[in-house]
């Protein structure tokens, strides 16, 4: 399975951009990178995903390096409600066309005043 | 509103008892998943189902059982054979198991064994 490595925790001042890095050096050519976040004791919330091009939606931007070995999730203007654990995940193939998402321990982002 | 509903939110059980966690979705999704989360840990896959009347073991299936008799329902039974059942259980669904789109999660069920 392709593994991901994330820093265990990060701090960000409210209103500033939060840049969350992720290393996935063993990723295969057809594996997507997903980002989810989890607020304490709730179900994870989807943020964004991508294959090789940079992606942007109303929540965040995803920057994937050209060699696809790492990526960065950017929250452009962090708020206190963005305090959560952020998971970087690589889509792993199961049997045939089935796939699963393997969640590591993520990065705990603390947004402060 | 479409979504995934898990119940109960909190559950207490005595050792040696089986317990069933409910997961219902009205998103018309084919694929459904059960994950377990321990404190400070990531999510681990227990079982998944690609279609009605079919399901496969995930990484930590021992001590658990599931059924998929209806498309919208994927209940998880935690049996007495599960050595350490106290955990946060999350159900998820996706339009199709090979779909690259997002995985939708329920709000979770927290099981405590007394």
Image (tube, coloured by chain):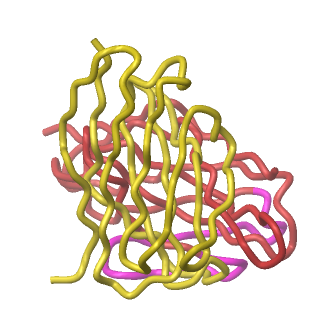
Chain colours: A red, B yellow
On the image, the x and y values in percent for residue B48 come to 59, 61
Q: Check residue A2 for magenta coloring.
A: no
Residue ID at (64%, 34%): B62
Q: Is residue A9 above or below residue A97?
A: above
Q: Quadrant of the N terminus of chain B?
A: bottom left
Residue sitting nearer the eye, A41 or B69:
B69
Q: Which residues fall within the magenta stretch?
A: A50-69
Q: Check residue A52 for magenta coloring.
A: yes
- Furthest residue to the bottom? B28
Q: Is residue B15 above or below residue A68?
A: above
Q: Decide whether the magenta segment is chiefly helix, strand or loop.
A: loop
Residue sitting nearer the eye, B63 or A62:
B63
Q: Is residue B54 left or right of residue A60?
A: right
Q: Is residue A1 above or below residue A95?
A: above
Q: Is residue A81 above or below residue B92?
A: above
On the image, the x and y values in percent for residue B11 come to 21, 32
Residue ID at (31%, 80%): A58
Q: Quadrant of residue A91?
A: bottom right
On the image, the x and y values in percent for residue B114 come to 27, 11
Residue ID at (26%, 47%): A42
Residue ID at (18%, 36%): B10
Total numbered labels: 0
């Amino acid at each position: 399975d392709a593994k991901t490595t994330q820093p265990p925790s990060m701090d960000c001042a409210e209103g500033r951009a939060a840049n969350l890095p992720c290393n996935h050096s063993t990723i295969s050519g057809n594996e997507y990178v997903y980002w989810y976040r989890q607020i304490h004791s709730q179900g994870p919330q989807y943020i964004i995903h991508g294959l090789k091009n940079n992606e942007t939606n109303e929540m965040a931007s995803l920057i994937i390096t050209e060699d696809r070995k790492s990526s960065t999730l950017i929250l452009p203007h962090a708020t206190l409600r963005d305090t959560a654990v952020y998971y970087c995940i690589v889509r792993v193939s199961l049997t045939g066309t089935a796939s699963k998402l393997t969640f590591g321990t993520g990065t705990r982002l603390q947004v402060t005043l | 509103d479409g979504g995934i509903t898990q119940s109960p939110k909190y559950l207490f059980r005595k050792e040696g008892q089986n317990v069933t966690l409910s997961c219902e979705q009205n998103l018309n999704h084919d694929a459904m998943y059960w994950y377990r989360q321990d404190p400070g840990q990531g999510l681990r896959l227990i079982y998944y189902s690609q279609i009605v009347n079919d399901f496969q073991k995930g990484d930590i299936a021992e001590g658990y059982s599931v059924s998929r008799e209806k498309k919208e329902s994927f209940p998880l039974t935690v049996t007495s054979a599960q050595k350490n059942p106290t955990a946060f259980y999350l159900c998820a669904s996706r339009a199709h198991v090979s779909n690259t789109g997002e995985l939708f999660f329920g709000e979770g069920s927290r099981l405590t064994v007394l």
